[in-house]
Image: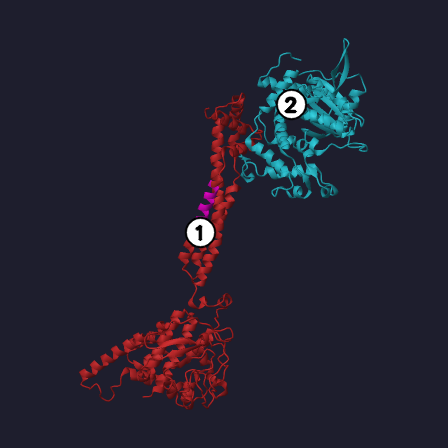
Amino acid sequence: MRTSPAIARIRAARRMLNLRRGLSMASRWGATAAAVSAPAACAAILAGWTAPPLAATLAFAAGTAGFLAGFALSVRGRYRDRHAALWLDRGLADDGLFSAALACLERARLGAPGPRDAWLAARADSAVPASAGLRVPARYLTRPLAALGASFLLCAAALAVPPATAGERGASPADRAAGTVPLGSEAGETVEELLAKAAESPSPEDLARSLFPDQPELADLLADALRDGRLADAEKILEKAELARTDLRREEGQGIGAPGAQSLHERLQEAVREQGGSSTGSDETRTERGEEGGSGDQKSAQTGEQDAAPMEAPDGAGAQAPGDGAAAGTGGSGGTGSGTGGQDGNGGDSGIESPGGLSDPSSGDKSKGGGASGSGSGVSRDWGPIDPSATGGDLGIRPLDGGAYFELLLPEDGSGMTDLQRVIASSRSAEEAIARLSLPAEYEEAIRAYFTLLNRDAAAAAGP
Amino acid sequence: MKTETDTSMEGLLELVAAARREMARAVVGQEEMIDLVLAAILCEGHVLLEGVPGIGKTLIATSAAGCLSLDYGRIQFTPDLMPSDVLGASMLEDRGGQYGLRFEKGPVFANLVLADEINRASPKTQSALLEAMQERAVTVRGDTMALPRPFIVLATQNPLEMEGTYPLPEAQIDRFLFKAIVGHPGLEDLVRIVGLTVGAPRTPARPVVSREGVAALQEAVRGVELPPAMVEYAARTVMLTQGDRPEAPQAVRDFCRYGAGPRGAQALVLAAKAAALLDGRFHAGMKDLERFLLPALRHRVSVNFEGQSQGVLPEDLVKAAAAAARTAVGPDAALGPEKAKA
């Protein structure tokens, strides 16, 4: 049977219907997928899990995948000729004329034409011109397409989302909104406050300027290295400067061991000692540990605990820091500060020394002046397991009490280390441990400030 | 009446149109009822007419028989009516000194039988007629006699005065192609009825279609093209009248005691074809299916007690099922089509 105009019209209608339906379904699926993935991408960017371009690309990809999936589904359930014939019949209200013509075609294809097939086909052909004006409502396609466009714009908006800072990664949305990141649930002190306290201490710039008063470029380099915690670089700078000075002395005819040939390391220690002494007086070193007025020999306290010197007290009580010579060497788990004098004003510093126990710097025994056993009531925080191999070659850190405390592990020959070396090594270990733990930037700054103070105290304690 | 029946397509359509005209002339008003009876005759199906007395049921039957050249028989059902009064009886006959039995055909041996107030007869008599309706044959004393073709029964029942009646069992009601509710005529029709009937005696319906013509029309009805999607719609509608189907509408699931069966689907499709032919077409569509939807299905759906207490009618359930089936047929309704603006 020849393809009559009615049959051709039915097939054209079928193709048009399938295309419209496919585009509509694809748009709906694509819009849904993009609408779901765009907020997820924004959330991932804000959480710092991924960069905006990658997140936006993934959101676009999800939308595109949804589009293709919708189109594929529409192909699975695509309309047949009989559906298109019904669509035409519905539009023309012709009581099934096109459907009847299609049935006639089927019968002819099967070799069993009916007596009235030709008559019906002729009637259907005559109705073809009237069907030319039939169309699918525009809203059937425009609405899904508009939704798709809006969803893709949402994906594009992910590019404008600012990536999370290191501090925001660990902060709650409310804290991020407020711009403050508390260091503990019960801290009561924000990072800004702690940094302000840290800023009161001698800065690396001061130290560097004291070492290189007439070489500001070198001082800046050293300050940057100290500020960034690149102690190895700082040491290299010092060594180079020392070598240069040695060469200069040699050219000037002075011996290396001549009087006044003080090494830069020594000068650094001296500068630290001087600045530390000027800022806190004689009892300065106890304050940062949460010990109050410990006027004794803290050097002996430190060196007496070589094997297991507690580095930080999460509870902020300065538990591990011996505050008094009399109590020195009483064990690695807690100093028995019995110092006199009240320096409780510096008790806040002790909060810097432990991310886990910073929550309540004023808690604990430090305010009692007696430093009784260094116990505290800070809230411990689970920092997870720490890989000792990540803590550097010289020293190690291992968690105690489920992460509530950190223990500094000294090498076998740690007794031969100077205070400055020990502090530098421990600070490097701490830096690496902190880096491995992916602490928020604000925490890192706070800890770095703590080690700056510790460095100063250690240099002062080492003595000339 | 033409002696030769024009069986061409145009000739068949002309026969249908002539029958409708003559019926409309003989019966004032009740156009829908006329088409229903003509459709039943074209489908060779039986009709159960339900309505109060005096609204033209008998006139429709006699007029249909008259214009279609059909033999007409009438049986007034009463409680003491016996099956032999319907089917016929064997009579003792003297054949020259020898006696034999001769079967005397009953009123059922006619082309168009009006079974008036069928629910007043006993179930035994009802069953005799209903068996003849189904088999289109009568068996008496072991002898089976075919009924004349076409054989159509127009049964009436009075919804009032139900005392002393024997309602037809559902299984037997299912054998009727249509169940029509005949209502009172409207004001305009009533005025015409009065004006035409109280004056000069009216001319009864003239035969405009021969019996061969009726047979040709019955054959043509079965040749009307009904798209497969429409057949699916009819079948789906019937399925959705069954309350135990999870896809059935809520009203059907709640209030249906039993739904339509295969006979319902057959009746719906055949009625749609007849409706298309009555409309002068050899192709049927959704409109034709829905034209006789209620007459074809209302007596095949039963409402449970809860539904009856809430005033739910079988027609409500049929409409709900058809509405649910309609959404599953054809392209998505959102696809239109709509007419393009000029």
Stretch in magenta = A64-75
Q: What is the letter of the red chain? A: A
Query: Is residue B5 among what the camera can see?
Result: yes
Q: How is the image coloured?
A: by chain
Residue that mark 2 sits on: B42
Q: The residue marked by circle 2 belongs to what chain?
A: B
The residue singled out by tag 1 in the image is A62
Where residue B124 appears, x then y in whole percent? 75, 28
Q: Tell me if A389 is positioned left or right of A3 in this view.
A: left
Q: Which quadrant would residue A261 be assigned to in this image?
A: bottom left
| Residue A391 lies in the magenta stretch | no
Q: Secondary structure at mark 1?
A: helix
- The answer to which of B233 and A349 lies nearer the viewer is B233
Among the chains pictured, the one given cyan colouring is B
Q: Disc 1, disc 2: CB below 8 Å?
A: no
The residue mark sitting in front, 1 or 2, is: 2
Q: Is B67 displayed left or right of A341 in the figure? A: right
